[in-house]
Amino acid sequence: MSGGSGQWKGRALRPREDERFVTGRGLYLANLNLPRSLHAAILRSVHPHARIISVDASEALKLPGVACVLTGEQAKAISRPLRSLIPLPVEVPHYCLAHDKVRYVGEPVAAVAATSRYIAEDALEKIRVEYEPLPAAVDPEKSMAPGAPILYESLGSNVLWHDCFDYGEVDRVFAQAAHVLTERFFIQRYSSTPLETFGCIANYDDARSYLTLWTNDQRPGQAMPIIAHSLGLSAAQIRFITADIGGGFGNKRKPPYLVLTALLSKLSGRPVQFIEDRRENLMALVHACNGVMDVSVAVAEDGTLVGLKVRDIADEGANLLNPTVHSLLKLGNITNCYGIRAVRFDGYSVVTNKCPSGANRGIGKPFMCFALERMMDSVARRLGRDRIELREKNLLPPESMPYTTPTGALIDSGNFPATLKKLLEIADYRSFKEEQKRARAEGRWLGFGLAIAVEPSTSNQSAYILTTKRRAASGAGEAAMVRVESDGSVQVVLGDVGSGQGHQTAAAQIVADELGVPFDEVQVSPYFDSLVSPWMYTTGNYSNKFAGTDVGAIQGAARKVKEKLLDLGAHLLGVPRETLELADGAVRSRSDPQRRKTLAELAHVAYRDLLALPAAMEPGLEGRYYYRPALADLPDDERRVRNQLFVSNAAHAAIVEVDVETGKVSILKYAIVHDCGTVLNPLIVEGLVHGATAHGIGAALYEEFAYDEQGQLLTTTFVDYLKPSAMEIPDFKNDHLESPSPFTPFGMKGVGEGGAIPAPAAIANAVDDALAPLGVRLTHLPLTPERVWKAIQSAQGKT
Amino acid sequence: MKPAPFRYYRASSVEEALDLLNGPAAGGKLLAGGQSLVPLMNLRLARPEAIVDLNRIAALSYIRPEGGEIAIGALTRHRELEFSPLVRAELPILAEAVPQIGHPAIRNRGTVGGSVAHADPAAELPCVFSALDARIVVAGTGGRRTIAARDFFVGFYETALAEGEIVEEVRVPVRPRPKGWSFLEFARRHGDFALAEASALLYPDDSGARCAAARVVVGGGAVDKPFAPASVENLLQDEFNSNLKMDSIASLLKRAGELAEAEIRARGAAREDGAYLFRLAATLVSRSLGAAIRRWQGS
Amino acid sequence: MNTPELVSVSVEVNGACFDATVEARKTLADFLREDLGFTGVNLGCEHGVCGACSVLLDGAVVRSCIMFAGQADGAKIVTIEGLARGGKLHPVQRAFLDHHALQCGFCTPGMVLAAVDLLRRNANPTAGEIREALAGNLCMCTGYVNIVRAVKAAAQILQAERAG
């Protein structure tokens, strides 16, 4: 595919979405107001694990303003089980509300629709639930052991999935290696917590059996079939609409809430709006898996990493919807930027009495990167080698691209040594060593840490065949529509409207170049509307897939229209089509630009003056394109697969100061070099790099969903769940390289996750470097002051 | 996340507020800045039957010198303290502490009386007022009484206020004037409630060279109320003077921290695993005293 | 409590006067959004931490989710919708556009108003002062870097406007 030259792509155009946001006119879900709309509230479990004996809503129903109450038993009676996205070994029927047991604090037990959210919450207090509390499975390792409390009896165990993947001669490589190092790492539960919470408005038209859903669910293509199945509707009986989404990061998808709200609408005969409050969001929407990872590396005498063994336990919480995602994605970045050829991944997905896990910026990759980049520093220490030189030795060289990793992932492009070199330049690494010495003499503890990362994007659905052994879906894709309207204006409709990534701006840049019209004249709809927008199962805003699939869909749709414009222009101008081009809002002769037909003139014919069309030409000027990247494959016999298709990369460096008396870690400098191939809009790309990095810093130092030993969640507000503010996030020094992908339309690659993947490793490596003279080694995230302080105490033998 | 219903009363004078609180709004809650109360109500962790809104009592918003004291009305917003030239000139430790309360939006609404009555051991004002030997003037139907700050704060969110009483004013002495002073706090993030905080005030004797009295008060997660470790105050009073050399000061600060830790530990009021919080409080005591001593030396 | 407790509220919002009777427990944020239609007041946490619902109340930035509507009786309020004058964006809004100081936009109304509040007190803040003033407003998208740049730029625009 050729990279079309153009005047709009590559420019730092101000994202057009920003204009409505700075004036407070965002089209967020909560701003839509349907007449007669009711407000829903959800009664949630206060127990981590309990049998539901009875639910009595009679008092709640008496409250003025309450329209209806839905209990778990009712939901079971009037809806079908929720279909899991990732099939389980044994199907466990589960519904939008708990009916037999509750399995985590915050699990929905009953729901109320009332004339206001205030009254709905009053009604919740009047619902009586009798529980028989059960012991809870909280720690993932203990939950795997025989005798642990079982969440789902029909599964017989809390181990939802276990598999061991071997690539290369792992045992031989380890047996013959000069050095073998083994370490254990822990990652906490955290989440990106978009500032707008999840929500939906359902209007169930019983007379027509037709459901209209307005929602900020970021993955419509996946949600619709689940809702249809649960409600017993066909896909043609559902209209699904999204508008501006106030941040997603993977978190915003929750089919059970969509079903529940639809049922309330069906019961009440009125539109019903459910919008999570922040406590519900923190307790019950989604957490990234916490986990434990045992990592062993085999190293040759010269410092070459030759083997890698990973035993990974992902704590899924009560996740039946899409387990194993975290595990599977680790297979895609398991060897990072290195040429390791022998790899074992022994993965466990374990259910516990905690909030269901699910997608969150990076999904699994931040932990994998954390573990391996921490190991690189350990290897350097053990071998007495410089940690940068050790990395340089092991980096894949640019001439090896495209490179297939042992697990089958294709690294399509990238210059890893150059990325690292540039990072060291902008991070002032050489001068830091002196600074560190001076500081230590003054009793200040400074450290430098770095981490490098691959950032695979665009999920290939076939990868789930590895964990499910079923082919529920395969490949990757997205759809888009471009239409020249009857007056010649240009309209673009996207399958993936984005959630803050400037997709509407980027789409306009692409279409403006394709059709030769000014950027400002390309309208891009902020809405996804399943009645209008082309879509498929893979449609939605996830997996950093804009570059991998969306661009192809937009370009494909634009080119369909372009072809037709050229055909029509040739007909009307009476010249051969090959002599024509699209420029300045017209089809014109290359040799004589005055011979032209404007888009308005062409549209006039295409929509109104139909008899002026060539006899065989269909009226209208609309192109719909369903795009799938050719790289997607099926797993091979060796269980290798490209589970994500295009690979960006980054290198991060942090200079931190540790206050050894309080344990506080302060970031003094932070440098980023990022490579996502061709840059379509530098403003957007830089913003995403900053934001993702900030999220990685949050995971490194602040954020944690903490459960106590009984399974109670201790962090249910933003007072306890700490998001970094402008005071905690440093200024970033960032730069980029451009290694275009040979496999995407313009060489673009994913960008939204890059910062979130290496940041925790870079910061932890810096803290270890600062505290190296004390022999401190940190293995648990986040690096809270208390945790750092205790590590120092224990290294000094004080505890 | 919406509050439960309540009866709402507006008071335009202290007398009216007292009548309400001791009449139709009995058992209810006073609403001042609402920066702590309303979040709890939204979460339905607080669900008062009645609310008496004090925000109309304009007469309770003032900062003025009275005798040897500065009188601060209960409805004075943190923001007014922050920008008060009088506070800056006469109570520099208060001027240092106030900008550390939350964020601008919180300081624009939060009030002095509200912070005092809420008595969060991790809040800034109770700690500083205790160190300054401030007095809290409270009004009840039976009249007014004045309570020393050190007696006013009783425990976790607990004060000496009787049922039906209202905090009306805080009176802070400005004489004697400390020669060394410091307020320091440590929080996970800027603006959060302190994991540990320490106020330190060093008062000179007539010669100006010796420490006649020291006030050290600790707040945060290690204590249940603003806590003054007497052994630390005594240590400073006994041993600190202008002639101390660097290494003697260092050893003094170290001992101050150790004494503070021992006293706080003995009190045993930490809400969670105490080891870290006790040590942190001690570190803040040492550091705050260190800063106070630097100011003493620089003056 | 069977009959809801009602209070009357008269407020000036963005230059227009409104009289209403609302339930006493209704928050100012919900009143502005639901009763008056100022949906630029976003609800991000409803417990006074995230700052998305910030408005200017009698000239000072406050969180409207932790005030009751009744408490705003007699007040002058400016929401994000009222910041632009005569179709001309406020310099802070312009700077946010120029520096792409937002992504999903949900924090933006509160962030812009917090910045306006800062620049009224401090015409030429340092980066550190900007960060401190905005630390009560959470942004999950930008990492704050462009926000700090935008506020610095807005300060310069405002100073130039004053000088000119």
Image (cartoon, rainbow, N blue to C red):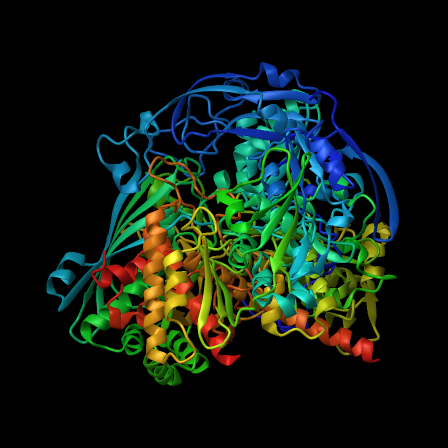
Q: How many marks?
A: 0
In the image, what residue occupies the spot 31% across and 67% down? A768
The picture places residue B297, in percent across and down from the top left corner, at 47, 79
Horizontal placement of A281 versus A779: left or right?
A: right
The picture places residue A465, in percent across and down from the top left corner, at 37, 43
In the image, what residue occupies the spot 27% across and 60% down? A793
> What is the quadrant of residue A456 in the picture?
bottom left
Foreground pick, B227 / A96? B227
In the image, what residue occupies the spot 19% across and 70% down? A382
Horizontal placement of B279 versus A74: left or right?
A: left
Horizontal placement of A583 versus A470: left or right?
A: right
Foreground pick, A334 / C123? C123
**Residue A94 vertical placement versus A340 (above, below):** above
| Quadrant placement of the C terminus of chain C | bottom right
Q: Is residue A332 visible?
A: no
**Residue A36 vertical placement versus C61 (above, below):** above
Foreground pick, A367 / A585? A367
Foreground pick, A354 / A742? A354
| Quadrant placement of the N terminus of chain C | top right
The picture places residue A34, in percent across and down from the top left corner, at 75, 34
In the image, what residue occupies the spot 39% across and 47% down? B270
Q: Is residue A117 visible?
A: yes
Horizontal placement of A731 versus C83: left or right?
A: left
**Residue A17 vertical placement versus B31 (above, below):** below
The picture places residue A774, in percent across and down from the top left corner, at 25, 69
Q: Residue furthest left?
A: A176
> What is the quadrant of residue A208 in the picture?
top right
